[in-house]
Image (tube, rainbow, N blue to C red):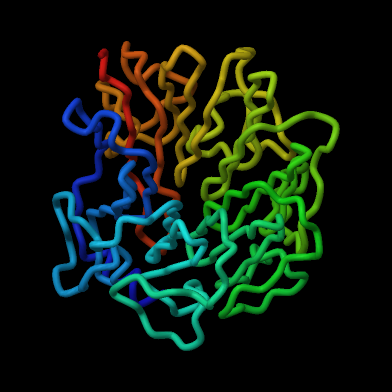
Amino acid sequence: MKTQQRKMKKLLLLLCIFLFSNTYSQQWEKIKTGSEFTIALKSDGSLWGWGFNASGQLGMPATNQIYSSLIKISEDMDWKEIATGGFHSLAIKNNGTLWGAGLNGNGQLGIEGKIQYEEFVQIGNDTDWVYVEAGFVSSYAIKRDGSLWAWGYNTNAQLGLGHLQDVAQPTRVGSDNDWERLSCGGLIVLGLKKDKSLWQWGFYFTLDSSGYVFDNILSPSCIDSNDKWLMISAGMEHAFALKEDGTLWAYGDNVNFALGDTSIVVANEFTQITQNKDWKHVEAGSIYTFALNNQGELFAWGINMYGQLGIVEKNDYVEIPTKVSNETEWLSISAAKGGISDIYIFGMHSVAIKNDDKN
């Protein structure tokens, strides 16, 4: 991982938002941004990618380290779910098999050995995977029976296995069979169960009169089981959750205004952001955030030094939720989660899908 970071420091990339135009309208179903790359899934089951590929995370030979345009990753047309980590990618096919490509130094591909894979290889032999998620150097998946599995980097208990050791193959998290989805940006992990309860594990910190207090939550811990939570998204040191009533809630560090509220330094627990009750989608990036409302309007806040918020006025910081444009045709957005080295922040680009087919 450190070797990869050194490579990245030497690389100058143009980081921007990709807006899929009318040419691709209704074709793109899912997009996922890794630290410096993106993969996308079309409605015909084909898989596409672009960006930084030095570790083979695009599932293509790493000899060409940067793909500056859309490249079809494989001839297979049966891809169903996708996920991206720092330098690895995961995918599920229609037959329920699980696949991975890219860096594997901490077992994040779920394959023994620390060999990187420059094409998608099957992870195990199970055929009942239905959901997949990736953190910066960790991986997660849910099976058809609702069981949760995790593998990869685990120094801050982000795997939720009750210990701090890395795991190089999918390992079951607890014994519950009611997991629905989860999100891991780096060290903070959020989970939702089928009863819409909210759970958290991994890196945990608060701010009190003596300063920052850091800890690890070793296993999934229920944050709230009274309200109905609809969606979750974890960034690098902050996280968001959306309730079914349309309210938006935030946790974590606000040093770069990633929480979108200037009155907060650190949210020690989930705190409501804005009084609006019409939010329907939230996406936390590395140190910035997006949200969509029911009218299809896109809002952004946080760090914006590379224009990753898509706001024309390129300020270094956007302190509160600010409308990206006057358009109302946004469907979904993916923001790179990234990570931090001594002098570099990975994950400063965003990708969005629009519905601009008026016919």
| Nearer to us in this view, 74 or 326 | 74
The residue lying furthest to the front in this view is 95
Name the quadrant of the N terminus. Answer: bottom left
Residue 248 lies, with reference to residue 175, above or below; the image says above
Judge from the rendering whether residue 27 lies leftward or rightward of residue 200; answer left or right.
left
Quarter-of-image position of residue 149? bottom right
Q: Residue at x 62, y 53 (%)?
A: 188
The number of discs equals: 0
| Nearer to us in this view, 305 or 28 | 28
Residue 315 lies, with reference to residue 92, above or below; the image says above
Residue 151 lies, with reference to residue 319, above or below; the image says below
Judge from the rendering whether residue 112 lies leftward or rightward of residue 274; answer left or right.
left
Judge from the rendering whether residue 208 lies leftward or rightward of residue 345; answer left or right.
right
Residue 77 at x, y = what percent? 30, 56
Name the quadrant of the C terminus. Answer: top left
Residue 142 at x, y = what percent? 63, 58
The residue lying furthest to the right in this view is 226
The residue lying furthest to the bottom in this view is 113
Q: Residue at x 39, y 17 (%)?
A: 323
Q: Residue at x 54, y 66 (%)?
A: 138
| Nearer to us in this view, 343 or 46 | 46
Q: Residue at x 63, y 42 (%)?
A: 252
Residue 24 at x, y = what percent? 21, 33
Residue 48 at x, y = what percent? 26, 53
Residue 333 lies, with reference to residue 69, above or below; the image says above
